[in-house]
Image: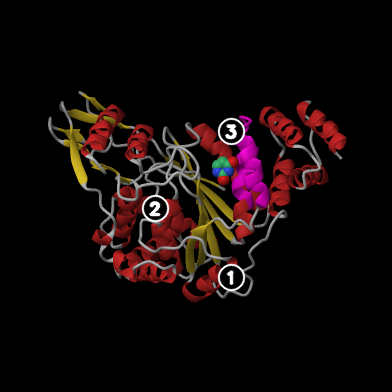
């Protein structure tokens, strides 16, 4: 069989197209070890250079889905929705959106990952709630969704086993940054999750995977074409990740901010993105007849406290203390809190997501290697946003640290992430761009 892989690698190397069966055979051979990983790696590198056609990308995604289990929700009496963010700094949107959409009448099983490098992971954030279990079996997860309409869980290993295997090979062969490979990896997990409506939040900027809007647009297009091709109602929203989303970066700090947002007192940009993604989910799944209707419904569910009560049900169902929703002060807190002040006056021209994330990482909020522990309590709260006018001594950020020495080291790194300008800088306020 392994000699059979050579002509396929050769064809892709020369810019040709593989048939769906050929892609399926490569994946199956990789998983059953009849095709060695060096041949799969050579093919992945050829894909990086030559790309994949739309048909190949869809075939690749479907072949990946077929390597594992898929979730079925046909018996549910509510529309199933899902979302995915390509990852960023301070992105805690799922923690707000999942209970909100469940309250609005959707079934929402959100499978998430852990943080790695400078980007945070929803599972690490949730585990800052004492006792919260993210590893639910498929049966328990299904029962929970039927009972309360939502679950926030780890990606089930029963779904798309090919993705984990391929990703670890891509990781060590410099073949991660290929649009068809990223798109098929993301969408295989969404398709296997079984939702009828999928909204993708594609980030761009220093804190994101895709640094430019052009690159984000290209990925968004590929994601939406796969979703449409597989018969799901799919849309992508482009959003900026130059500054962190909201103010909090760090696990318990982010959970607190998400709970504040559910309780009506969170930062405006986090609520705006939640509403934007929620509006598309409502429209595509038939839960709202217009964008105005969706915004009105979602806002009312926040204001009445219904969405917060739905979050209490979710936390309780998954083993956490539901009182934390109304009392985020029950979350772990860092012993050292230090304010970093501006040393000049001027307008904030940059509050760079990547640098702020690295300061939080250095404090222990993230991990450098898979499997490293994270400290739930530490992180950064950003107090100065791009466009703010600051007087000397005005706060830029708060460092939440385990020790004075850690706070001191993070302060230096954090300062370098901010740039002040003597001239007025406008707040970004970019409109969201929609693809699909
Ligand atoms: N996220 C994924 O799930 N897969 C990729 O390939 C890249 C980012």
Judge left or right: residue 255 versus residue 348. Answer: right
At a point 80% along the width and 38% down the height, the residue shown is 18
Q: Quadrant of ligand 1?
A: top right
**Where does the image place residue 284, in percent across and percent down from the top left?**
54, 60
Q: State the quadrant of the N terminus.
A: top right
Q: Nearer the viewer, residue 349 or 431?
A: 349
Main SS of the magenta part reads helix
Residue at numbered disc 2 = 125
Q: Which mark is residue 177?
A: 3
Label 1 or label 3, whichever lies nearer to me, is 1
**SS type, badge 1:** helix
- The residue pinned by badge 1 equals 139
Q: CA distance from mark 1 to mark 3?
A: 35 Å
Q: Is residue 11 above or below residue 323?
A: above
Q: Nearer the viewer, residue 11 or 218?
A: 11
N-terminal of the pair, mark 3 or mark 2, is 2
Q: Is residue 210 visible?
A: yes
Query: Which segment is the magenta one?
Result: 161-188
Q: CA distance from mark 3 to mark 2?
A: 26 Å
**Gap in angstroms between the C-alphas marked 1 and 2:** 24 Å
């Amino acid at each position: 069989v392994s000699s059979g892989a050579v002509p396929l690698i050769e064809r892709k190397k020369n810019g040709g197209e593989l048939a769906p069966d050929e892609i399926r055979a490569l994946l199956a051979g990789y998983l059953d070890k009849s095709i060695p990983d060096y041949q799969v790696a050579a093919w992945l590198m050829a894909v990086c250079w030559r790309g994949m056609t739309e048909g190949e990308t869809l075939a690749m995604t479907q072949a990946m889905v077929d390597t594992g289990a898929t979730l079925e929700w046909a018996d549910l009496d509510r529309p199933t929705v899902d979302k995915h963010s390509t990852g960023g700094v301070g992105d805690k949107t799922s923690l707000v959106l999942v209970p909100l959409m469940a309250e609005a009448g959707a079934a929402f099983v959100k499978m998430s990952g852990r943080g790695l490098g400078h980007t945070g992971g929803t599972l690490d954030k949730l585990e800052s709630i004492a006792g919260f279990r993210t590893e639910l079996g498929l049966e328990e997860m299904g029962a929970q969704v039927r009972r309360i309409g939502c679950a926030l869980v780890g990606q089930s290993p029963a779904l798309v086993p090919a993705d984990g295997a391929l990703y670890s090979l891509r990781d060590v062969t410099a073949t991660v940054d290929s649009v068809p490979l990223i798109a098929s990896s993301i969408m295989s997990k969404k398709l296997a999750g079984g939702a009828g409506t999928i909204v993708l939040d594609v980030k761009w900027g220093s804190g994101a995977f895709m640094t430019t809007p052009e690159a984000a647009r290209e990925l968004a297009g590929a994601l939406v074409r796969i979703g449409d091709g597989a018969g799901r109602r799919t849309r992508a929203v482009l959003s900026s990740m130059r500054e962190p989303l909201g103010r909090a970066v760090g696990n318990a700090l982010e959970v607190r901010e998400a709970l504040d947002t559910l309780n009506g007192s969170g930062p405006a940009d986090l609520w705006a993105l939640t509403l934007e993604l929620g509006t598309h989910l409502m429209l595509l799944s038939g839960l709202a007849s217009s964008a105005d209707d969706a915004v009105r419904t979602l806002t009312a569910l926040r204001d009445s406290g219904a969405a917060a009560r739905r979050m209490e049900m979710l936390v309780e169902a998954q083993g956490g203390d539901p009182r934390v929703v109304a009392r985020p002060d029950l979350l772990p807190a860092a012993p050292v809190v230090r304010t970093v002040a501006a040393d000049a006056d001027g307008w904030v021209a940059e509050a760079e997501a990547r640098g702020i994330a690295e300061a939080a990482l250095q404090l222990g909020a993230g991990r450098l290697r898979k499997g490293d522990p994270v400290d739930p309590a530490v992180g950064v709260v950003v107090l100065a946003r791009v466009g703010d006018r600051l007087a000397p001594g005005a706060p830029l950020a708060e460092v939440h640290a385990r020790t004075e020495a850690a706070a001191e080291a993070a302060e230096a790194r954090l300062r370098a992430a901010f740039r002040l300008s003597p001239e007025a800088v406008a707040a970004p306020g970019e409109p969201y761009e929609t693809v699909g």
